[in-house]
Image (spheres, helix red, strand yellow):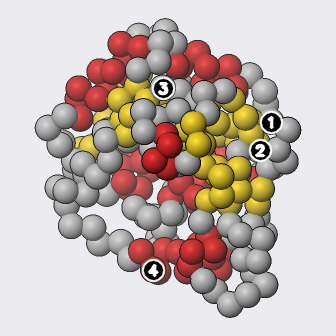
Amino acid sequence: MVLAIATRGWSGWASCVDTWYVTAKNGWLRQYVVCNKDVLPAYQEALERTTQPIIAFIHDDVEIYEKNWDTRVLAEFSDPAVGMVGFAGALGHGTPNLYTVPYYLPNLARQNFLSNMRDAEKHGARFAGTCDVAILDGLALFVRRSILEKAGGWPLDKPVGYYMYSEWLCCEARRQGYRIRLVGVDCKHLGGKTATLVQLKDDYQEAHRYFYENNRDVMPFRVEEK
């Protein structure tokens, strides 16, 4: 596994990354850092310049507190049917009537959000175990390289960017027949650090409309609760 880190250099980013290594069982995890690029060009560079079969895209404002978190994540990939793993996600992606009523952006929302973040209840329900999910939050995405390669890399020429990139990737994983797993790792997402340093050029409305129009084959989606 390689850690692909995109950063605009906010003051605490290196301290956040340090928490990943302090708590990992494999304290020598490789990393590839891209500075001062928009998120998808940065992630694409990491994809092209690394070779490891599992790529970790973790926000540079995430702190990890759980010992051996990397062991939990990598254990999920021992099942070849698992294509993605993350720290936060939801059982449903899109409302059941998503395509039976006129386009309505809130209908794209995640349903039944779970995490073990320090403020989990603020976002949904607390969950420290492991389970299948429909969608992962972009704060921490672990993905098989083969999924991105088969998809032709990150969608640099599409409206998807700062908005909807994690949703796009989860749809690609589902489209390719993979399961998506949530691992409830003890962590904290500080949030918004990069957004304070740059003026976002991406169009929120356009990204959602594009996503809606181009994922009808895998949306809406919900995992079977056990």
Residues at discs 2 and 3 in contact (Cβ within 8 Å) = no
Work out whether residue 209 or residue 3 is closer to the camera in this orientation and state it.
Answer: 209
Question: Which comes before the other along the chain, label 4 or label 2?
Answer: 2
**Residue at (29, 72) in percent of width and height:** 201
- Please name the residue that numbered disc 1 is placed on: 81
**Residue at (63, 86) in percent of width and height:** 103
**Distance of mark 2 from mark 1, alpha carbons?**
5 Å
Question: Which comes before the other along the chain, label 1 or label 3?
Answer: 1
Work out whether residue 57 or residue 121 is closer to the camera in this orientation and state it.
Answer: 121
**Distance of mark 4 from mark 3, alpha carbons?**
32 Å
Three-letter amino acid code of the residue under disc 1: Ala
**Distance of mark 4 from mark 1, alpha carbons?**
33 Å
- Please name the residue that numbered disc 4 is placed on: 205
- Please name the residue that numbered disc 2 is placed on: 178
- Which labelled disc corresponds to residue 186? 3
Three-letter amino acid code of the residue under disc 4: Gln
- Assess disc 3: are there few (<14), some (14-19) or many (≥20) residues with their C-alpha within 10 Å of its C-alpha: some
**Distance of mark 2 from mark 3, alpha carbons?**
25 Å
Circle 1 or circle 3, nearest the eye: 3
**Distance of mark 4 from mark 2, alpha carbons?**
28 Å
- Assess disc 2: are there few (<14), some (14-19) or many (≥20) residues with their C-alpha within 10 Å of its C-alpha: some
Residues at discs 2 and 1 in contact (Cβ within 8 Å) = yes
Question: Which comes before the other along the chain, label 4 or label 1?
Answer: 1
Question: Which comes before the other along the chain, label 2 or label 1?
Answer: 1
**Residue 58 lies in quadrant:** top left
